[in-house]
Image: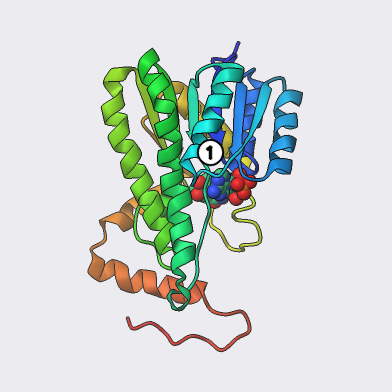
Amino acid sequence: MSPWTGTVALITGASSGLGRQLAGELGRRGARVGLLARREAELAEAAREVEAAGGRALPLPADVGDVAAVRAATARLHEAFGPVDLLVVNAGVGGSGPVERIDPERHAKVIRTNLLGAIHAVGCVLPSMLQRRSGKIVAVSSLAGWRGLPGTAAYSASKAALSTYFESLRVDLRSHGIRVTVVDPGFIDTPMTAGRSGLPLLVPVDVAARRILRAAERGAPTLAFPWPLALSLRLVRLLPARLYDPLAARAAWFAFQPAGGRPRSRPNP
Ligand SMILES: NC(=O)c1ccc[n+]([C@@H]2O[C@H](COP(=O)([O-])OP(=O)(O)OC[C@H]3O[C@@H](n4cnc5c(N)ncnc54)[C@H](OP(=O)(O)O)[C@@H]3O)[C@@H](O)[C@H]2O)c1
């Protein structure tokens, strides 16, 4: 029998990509899964997949940026299946582009979803975990949070803050019997990366989901993958800004050339 059999899990961002795959994997292991995201039709499909795999599912349409909606969704799940044993904080939006096209509203949305959405979800679930002195929390962050990557200021910042936030919680929650795993993936083959070419070491979504569940099962404090990309980023992290900045600017210059358009001026070295 799987350790997840009978587990009550809440997954944010369960309507597509990694969250939906995690839901299916948990369903296959006999878990009862609350699926939270905004798109109702996709949630209903994801719920059918979980049930077809052998689990039970409850679609919870909500926007993670709306704390009242997340609280109501958590209460519905509690009523239907009982208290949450596993919270997967996964809802996220990407965002990249040249600095000339910075859009404050778009950046605010990235921070609201990726960081505040995670804070809302954990804040709604934690009281019952603390009361029961047990539970697991998985925070899906990103290797993009390990350094301020070019062209992704809001996304990198949201993931750096997310990792730090959950690292603090991990330390605080140790003595309360609650395990926190901070996951930093590289590129995963999901709708978020669809249509982007040349992504290095793209990981299939089912491989990523299984790795994450294994780490959560062990109560691992962190998981970063694929390892060659994680190792490269670890080394990049050690570079002083004087070396990092011109190298990263050069990479951004190549990444954001308009296809077939007038080339942007070369960055100063
Ligand atoms: N794919 C990658 O290469 C990669 C790499 C590192 C980290 N990650 C992280 O992995 C997580 C999952 O991403 P993915 O690749 O699976 O992308 P995805 O397929 O686009 O899935 C994103 C999920 O987040 C949900 N979501 C977005 N905004 C939301 C909101 N305001 N409220 C509730 N749910 C919301 C979406 O559902 P609705 O639109 O239905 O709301 C969807 O279910 C993200 O946190 C992402 O940053 C991805």
User: Quadrant of the rendered structure where residue 267 is?
Assistant: bottom left
Quarter occupied by the N terminus: top right
Secondary-structure class at tag 1? helix
Q: Position of residue 148 (x, y in %)?
A: 35, 61
Please give the residue where the numbered disc 1 appears in the rendered image. Answer: 69
In front here: 157 or 150? 157
Q: Is residue 135 above or below residue 21?
A: above
Q: Position of residue 268 (x, y in %)?
A: 33, 83
The number of numbered discs placed on residues in the rendered structure image is 1
Seen from the viewer's position, the closer of residues 57 and 138 is 57
- List x then y, in percent, for residue 115: 41, 47
Q: Nearer the viewer, residue 128 or 72?
A: 72
Residue at x 35%, y 37% (from the top left corner): 166
Against 261, is 101 above or below? above
Identity, as a three-letter code, of the amino acid under mark 1? Ala
Residue 28 shown left or right of residue 86 in the figure = right
The reply to whether residue 235 is in sight is yes
Quarter of the image containing the C terminus?
bottom left
Name the residue at 27% across, 19% down: 175
Q: Is residue 180 above or below residue 29?
A: below
Q: Sort mark 1 into few (<14), some (14-19) or many (20+) by Cα contacts within 10 Å.
A: some
- Residue 28 vs 14, above or below: the answer is above
Viewer-side residue, 212 vs 174: 174
**Scheme of colours in the image:** rainbow
Q: Is residue 224 visible?
A: no
Q: Residue at x 44, y 27 (%)?
A: 125
Query: Does mark 1's beta carbon lie closer than 8 Å to ligand 1?
Result: no
Q: Quadrant of residue 227?
A: top left
Percent position (x, y) of residue 174?
29, 23
